[in-house]
Image (cartoon, helix red, strand yellow):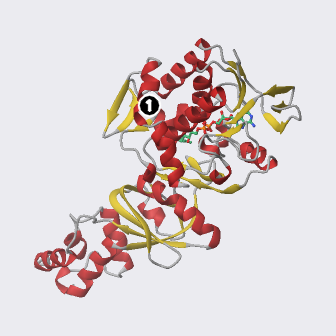
Amino acid sequence: MDKKKIGIIGGGAAGMAAAITAARKGASVTIFEAGDRLGKKLLSTGNGKCNLGNRVLDENCYYGTRKFVRDCLERFGVEDTISFFEGMGLMLRERNGYLYPWCEQASVVLDVLRNEITALGIHVIHQAKVIEVSPREKGGFFVRTLDEDFVFERVIFACGGKAVPKTGSDGSGYELAKKLGHRIVPVVPALTALKCKEAFFKGIAGVRADAEVTILGEDGKAAAKERGELQLTDYGISGIPVFQLSRIAAYQLQKKKEITVFLDFLPDLVNPEEAVNDRMGLRGSRTVEELFVGTIHKKLVSLILKLIQLKPTDSADRLSRKQIQHFFFLAKRFPVTAVATGDFQSCQVCAGGVDLAQLTEHLESRLHPGLYFIGELLDVDGRCGGYNLQWAWTSGHIAGMHAAGR
Ligand SMILES: Cc1cc2nc3c(=O)[nH]c(=O)nc-3n(C[C@H](O)[C@H](O)[C@H](O)COP(=O)(O)OP(=O)(O)OC[C@H]3O[C@@H](n4cnc5c(N)ncnc54)[C@H](O)[C@@H]3O)c2cc1C
């Protein structure tokens, strides 16, 4: 039988999924892992619980070429992910569609993957950083590590991006791909916080609020909005809604020095004028600060009062309708100025990467048939919610199948 010899560069989520798929199809598989163990990044996913997928899955959960992503998800979607893990003995739990291992330990996800890799006889070489891949005249490819050269019929690049480089993904995959003639869509941090320039953040650090966050585009109009738990820190804004918008901010910040983001601390208040009327009626013997107690977080009330130059201890009786309107206007459309995203050390994923236009639907290089690119290394990044790991399983499966089966 023609047993394909496949080399996989990188033993993260995508590399392990590709290795298991290809070995199950009968290929002889070797994983080169730069670190001293496989899947280091998996351990920190989902706050140590590993959100490995999501029942709500379609191409709109991703950035990159969505049609390409959709075609891939049609071939390996969430049901396939569930079968893949359950087939290796992992019991799963679901919370609002988010999938986790039943025991909520990311290390267990890694254990089942590693057990399967051992059971399939996949060869793993640790501390083997690949420094070059080149086509061989006689066919196949040389894979060069610092210590040794190898030859494979097919090579799958699964080096990750450069988010949290201490987990192994140091961006070397982009360089390897570039040397082989592949285009790299500019890589920026994504799923990360935004640093803001206002000095008042120190005073509101630690506040968490259900808020809608709107980021303005280059034309000054709303480019995107997200709702969820906003976290205010001493340097700016964080939390899931900010993470979801951060890749848009990152690309804009490459062109501009700063961008405006509006925070709506009362997203369910559709008619602010009613709230204004209510507060007008409450003025009585209250102080200005007391008048607004019960609206938004107390620290935010104090901040807004300061910004609109109202003294908290003054009598509310003297407040005009216009001043109360001003308070609610800011509570619903509070502007902050983002000047930077979190860096590659602190982001969860990278946006940008190997250009999908140079790949076939099997994630095979159009420039060098026999080479494949998968996972975060590609110009595909997902929203928070298990979508990046889903992309690792999906792309790993597709490339593993094709590399082993062709
Ligand atoms: C803190 C954190 C939390 C996250 N939580 C979630 C979550 O809950 N759900 C979710 O879906 N996603 C989450 N993600 C994102 C997700 O972990 C990644 O998108 C996913 O791990 C990418 O898989 P990958 O295999 O492409 O790359 P990686 O997991 O980064 O693996 C790449 C591997 O390649 C190795 N390597 C790199 N270059 C070379 C080389 N030249 N030679 C040999 N080996 C090399 C690296 O050592 C590494 O082991 C999180 C990320 C972070 C940082």
The picture places residue 71, in percent across and down from the top left corner, at: 50, 45
Q: Quadrant location of residue 143?
A: top right
Q: Is 12 in front, or is 189?
A: 12
- At horizontal 45% and vertical 41% (from top left) the residue drawn is 74
Figure quadrant of the C terminus: top right
Q: Position of residue 398 (x, y in %)?
A: 57, 35
Q: Is residue 185 above or below residue 320?
A: above
Measuring from the top left, give residue 136's x and y in whole percent.
Answer: 86, 34
Q: In this rendered view, identify the residue nearer to me: 10 or 339.
A: 10
In this picture, is 312 found above or below 184?
Answer: below
In the rendered image of this protein, does residue 10 appear above or below residue 338?
above
Displayed-image quarter of ligand 1: top right
Q: Residue 185 in the image: state x and y as whole percent.
A: 66, 57
Residue 270 falls in image quadrant: bottom left
Mark 1 sits on what residue? 80
**Residue type at the position of mark 1:** Asp
Residue shown at the point (54%, 58%) measured from the top left: 247
- Lateral position of residue 47 relative to residue 139, left or right: left
Left-right relation of 235 to 155 = left
Judging from the image, what secondary structure is the residue with disc 1 in?
helix
Dot 1, crowdedness within 10 Å: few (<14), some or many (≥20)? some
Considering the image in quadrants, where does the N terminus appear? top right
User: Which of the pair 360/276 is nearer the observer?
Assistant: 360
User: Can residue 41 be spotted in the picture?
Assistant: no
Residue 262 seen anywhere in this rendered image of the structure: yes
Q: Residue at x 82, y 26 (%)?
A: 151
